[in-house]
Amino acid sequence: MDDTDKKLIDVLRQNARISLSALSRIMGLSRSTVQDRITKLEQKGIIAGYTLRLGSDYAGREVRAQVMLKISPRSQDEIVAFCRRHTSVTRLYTISGEFDLIAHLRAESTNALDTVLDEIGRIKGVERTQTSVLLSTKFERAS
């Protein structure tokens, strides 16, 4: 991957729906060259897909939280399976330190968030949780 591919990825991170024409103007390349580069990045698995980013008005109505989980040994598979099935869990990471996992959650209300947190707390192998409710987003970069 060269600097042109990196710039192409940066532009797509900002707006994955940008037209090929606009993208080629920004990149200073022909449409066919840009399309070929995108296709190659997709084939190599560097670009795995495209996603939706909600506007701040809509996203601001959701309640979001991060939950750190301390789990017992050998219970990770069951916990990961639960989180994968539950649509309120948007991301799950293994982490270093006192806790073992961190889950990103979103819910329509604090009551809905509370319900999800209770469900997570009842999973066999979850020893302890610590939740932080996200209040506002100062800025966000596409991943």
Image: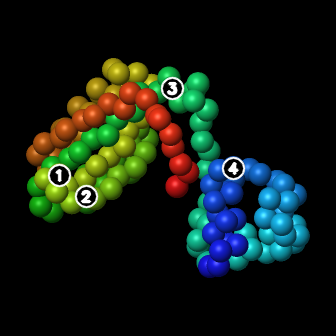
Q: Residues within 10 Å of mark 1 (few under 14, many from 20)?
A: some
Mark 1 and mark 2: Cα distance apart in space: 7 Å
Quarter the N terminus occupies: bottom right
Residue position marked by numbered label 3 in the rendering: 60
Type of amino acid at the residue the image marks with label 3: Gly
Q: How far is mark 3 from mark 1, CA to CA?
A: 28 Å
Q: Residue at x 51, y 43 (%)?
A: 140
Residue 49 vertical placement versus 4 (above, below): above
Q: Position of residue 28 (x, y in %)?
A: 83, 66
Which numbered disc flags the more N-terminal residue, 4 or 1?
A: 4
Amino acid of disc 1? Phe
Q: Which is more N-terminal, label 4 or label 2?
A: 4
| Badge 3: residue crowd in 10 Å (few <14, some 14–19, many ≥20) | few
**Which badge, 3 or 2, is on the more N-terminal residue?**
3
Q: Residue 121's x, y, as percent?
A: 19, 38
- Residue 99, which numbered label? 1
Mark 3–mark 2 distance (CA, rounded to whole Å) = 27 Å
Determine whether the residue tagged by mark 3 lies in a helix, strand or loop. loop
Tags 4 and 1 touching, CB below 8 Å: no
Left or right relative to 86: residue 24? right
Q: Look at 33% across and 56% down and name the residue there.
A: 93
Assess disc 4: are there few (<14), some (14-19) or many (≥20) residues with their C-alpha within 10 Å of its C-alpha: some
Residue that mark 2 sits on: 95
Marks 4 and 3 close (CB-CB < 8 Å): no
